[in-house]
Image (cartoon, rainbow, N blue to C red):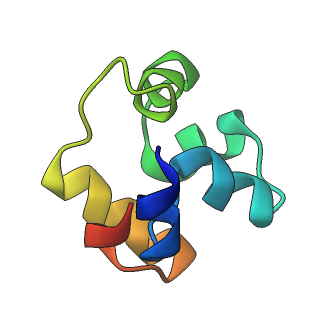
Amino acid sequence: MNSSNQEKGFKTLKQLRKQNNLTSKDMADKLGISKAFYSQLENRTRRLSYDMAIKISKIFNYKPDKI
């Protein structure tokens, strides 16, 4: 993520997870996916679907278009 995105209020999954004191296993459990799948999302080796962005936004009370 570049600094211009951070200035606009964008946050990475890792930033959101760490700010909320959650592990990647915690997130995987909350989303009903494997830890490996969640790690791929967080590391951007797998593309985040709209449905998954909505689920994540509800967990963090954060706008899905800012993830």
Please tell me whether residue 2 is drawn above or below residue 62 in the rendered image. Answer: above
Indicate the position of residue 41 as horizontal and vertical percent values.
41, 31
The residue at 50%/25% (across/down) is 43
Percent position (x, y) of residue 4?
Answer: 43, 61
Residue drawn at 35 percent across, 69 percent down: 66
**Furthest residue to the right?**
21
Please name the residue shown 41% across and 61% down the image.
Answer: 5
In the picture as drawn, the residue positioned furthest to the front comes out as 4
From what the image shows, is residue 13 above or below residue 56? above
Q: Is residue 63 left or right of residue 47?
A: right
Figure disc tally: 0
Q: Nearer the viewer, residue 41 or 15?
A: 15
Q: Residue at x 51, y 64 (%)?
A: 6
- Measuring from the top left, give residue 55's x and y in whole percent: 35, 63
Quarter location, residue 26: top right
Q: Quadrant of the C terminus?
A: bottom left
In the picture, measured across the screen, residue 29 lies left or right of residue 45, that is right
Q: x, y percentage for residue 35?
A: 57, 24
Return the residue nearer the eye: 7 or 36.
7
15 left or right, relative to 28 = right
52 left or right, relative to 25: left
